[in-house]
């Protein structure tokens, strides 16, 4: 089920996105081995939440969005480093690249 949320003037967009993401994580962590989470429309409509004023929501939403951006940038760096390591491994293990101080061919062992 897809639920559409009308933010109106009480909910700032970035705050709402972060809030619902945190709520999704909370729901996932509260399940006991089930692969399907059942949340009804009635459950969502009856849900009450505490909201700070719009200014504080903006600050919270922006702060958490920046944390997400930092995580994403870090993940890109990790992905790039993993690709570099893979290329280095290939070239070192097929001996196309050698350290300067080593020139003796590798011996085959069984």
Image (cartoon, rainbow, N blue to C red):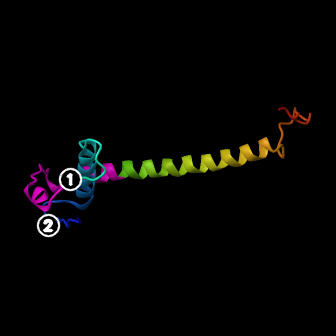
- The residues colored magenta run 38-65
**Which residue is located at x 48 percent, y 51 percent?**
73
Q: Is residue 47 left or right of residue 78?
A: left
State yes or no: residue 97 in magenta: no
What quarter of the picture does the N terminus occupy?
bottom left
**Which residue is located at x 20 percent, y 53 percent?**
57
Q: Position of residue 90 (x, y in %)?
A: 74, 46
Q: Is residue 30 left or right of residue 103?
A: left
Instruction: State the SS at label 2.
Output: loop
Q: Is residue 100 left or right of residue 39?
A: right
What quarter of the picture does the C terminus occupy?
top right
**Which residue is located at x 25 percent, y 49 percent?**
60
What residue is disc 2 on? Answer: 8
Q: Where is residue 55 in the image (x, y as percent from the top left)?
A: 19, 54
Q: Which of 3 and 11 is in front in this view?
A: 3
98 up-or-down from 50: above or below: above
What residue is disc 1 on? Answer: 57
State yes or no: residue 49 in magenta: yes
Quarter location, residue 45: bottom left
Q: Main structural element of the magenta stretch: helix, strand or loop?
A: helix
């Amino acid at each position: 089920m897809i639920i559409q949320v009308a933010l109106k003037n009480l909910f700032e967009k970035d705050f709402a996105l972060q809030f619902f993401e945190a709520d999704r994580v909370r729901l996932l962590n509260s399940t006991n081995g089930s692969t399907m989470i059942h949340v009804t429309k009635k459950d969502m409509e009856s849900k009450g939440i505490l909201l700070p004023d719009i200014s504080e929501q903006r600050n919270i939403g922006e702060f958490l969005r920046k944390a997400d951006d930092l995580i994403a940038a870090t993940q890109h760096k990790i992905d790039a480093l993993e690709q570099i390591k893979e290329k280095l491994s290939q070239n070192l293990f097929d001996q196309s690249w050698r350290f300067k101080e080593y020139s003796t061919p590798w011996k085959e062992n069984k």
